[in-house]
Image (spheres, rainbow, N blue to C red):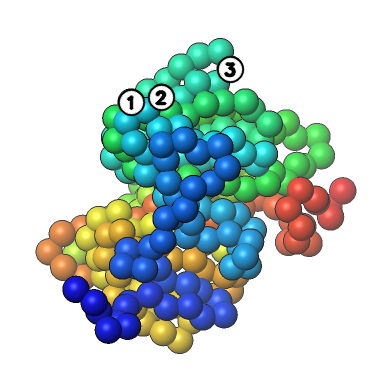
């Protein structure tokens, strides 16, 4: 049914909310039996790209010249890299460093979110190695002293990594303890439940399937509403000197 131009999607200078009713699929270079919904990228002002990839049985993801993080939303993917193979099932994920040849194919109909970013090297620090794991294998920790808000760090908190990917779970009624404003930009995919997100001077109802991009210093706050926990997967850039404004460079050298 036609919605007569109504949508929760919104675009502002410092944030974007994308809801599934506005998603448009495309095929990226190298994809075979696979389509993408590109949520954010340089055209939006982001210094990374995040998209959802929908695989047919046997579908294949294309190559990238950047580092890549893949998180399986549902289904099963086969990863081939460094002469070995690994299966990624629901909530399985992989980090693939820049320049590592690899192949990602689906063994059944699958859906995954993919994050790509040009690596920013640091002097005297070796780039990170590949990681294959599952969110289920990562222990959660309370955010601050609030046990109703728990976070899982899916990438090690090490200076080698120039970005972080976390999952966060809010019990019904839980919320961030403050409105945050910081240098990191975010890509956020709602996985379960819902609530209210403050972005800039706007307040948005959000639910599973929504995507949010937050520019640096965008005022942000979230509170979970409903009878089930709210969960999201969130990206942020990290561990680099603030003058390193251009991906692939480091002004601290």
Q: In this view, does 157 lie above or below 131?
A: below
Packing grade of label 1 (10 A; few <14, some 14-19, many >=20) is some
Packing grade of label 3 (10 A; few <14, some 14-19, many >=20) is few
Q: Quick check: 136 left or right of 233?
A: left
Tell me the residue that label 3 is attached to.
82
N-terminal of the two: label 1 or label 2?
A: 2
Foreground residue, 31 or 182? 31
Q: Is residue 124 above or below residue 119?
A: above
Q: Kindly give the residue lying farthest to the left in the view shown.
A: 227
For residue 95, which numbered disc appears in the image?
A: none
Q: Is mark 2 on a helix, strand or loop?
A: strand
Q: Quick check: 73 left or right of 32?
A: left
Q: Is mark 3 on a helix, strand or loop?
A: loop
Q: Can residue 132 be seen in this view?
A: no
Residue drawn at x 47%, y 72% as measured from the top left: 16
Q: Quick check: 104 left or right of 146?
A: right
Residue 194 percent across, percent down from the top left: 25, 65
Foreground residue, 209 or 43? 43
For residue 78, which numbered disc appears in the image?
A: 2
Is mark 1 in CB contact (under 8 Å) with mark 3? no
Residue drawn at x 68%, y 31% as measured from the top left: 99
N-terminal of the two: label 1 or label 3?
A: 3
Foreground disc of the pair 1, 2:
1
Callout count: 3
Foreground residue, 143 or 190? 190
Foreground disc of the pair 3, 2:
2
Tell me the residue that label 1 is attached to.
107
Is mark 1 in CB contact (under 8 Å) with mark 2? yes
Disc 3 from disc 2: Cα separation: 13 Å
Q: Quick check: 192 left or right of 49?
A: left
Residue drawn at x 43%, y 66% as measured from the top left: 212
């Amino acid at each position: 049914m036609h919605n007569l131009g109504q949508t929760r999607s919104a675009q502002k200078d410092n944030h974007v909310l994308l809801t599934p009713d506005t998603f448009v699929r495309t095929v990226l270079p190298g994809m075979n039996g696979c389509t993408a919904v590109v949520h954010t990228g340089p055209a939006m002002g982001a210094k990374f790209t995040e998209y959802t990839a929908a695989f047919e049985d046997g579908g294949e993801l294309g190559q990238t010249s950047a580092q890549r993080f893949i998180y399986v939303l549902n289904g099963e993917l086969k990863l081939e890299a460094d002469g070995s193979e690994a299966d990624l099932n629901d909530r399985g994920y992989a980090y693939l460093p820049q320049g590592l040849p690899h192949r990602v194919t689906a063994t059944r109909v699958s859906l995954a979110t993919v994050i790509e970013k040009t690596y920013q090297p640091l002097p005297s620090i070796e780039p990170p190695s590949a990681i294959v794991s599952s969110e289920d294998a990562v222990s959660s920790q309370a955010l601050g002293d609030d046990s109703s808000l728990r976070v899982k760090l899916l990438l090690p908190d090490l200076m080698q990594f120039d970005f972080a990917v976390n999952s966060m779970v809010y019990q019904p009624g839980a919320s961030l303890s403050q409105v945050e404003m910081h240098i990191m930009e975010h890509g956020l995919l709602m996985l379960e439940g819902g609530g209210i997100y403050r972005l800039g001077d706007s307040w948005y109802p959000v639910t599973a399937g929504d995507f949010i991009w937050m520019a640096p210093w965008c005022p942000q706050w979230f509170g979970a509403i409903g009878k089930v926990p709210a969960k999201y997967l969130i990206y942020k850039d990290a561990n680099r000197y603030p003058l390193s404004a251009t991906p692939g460079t480091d002004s601290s050298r």
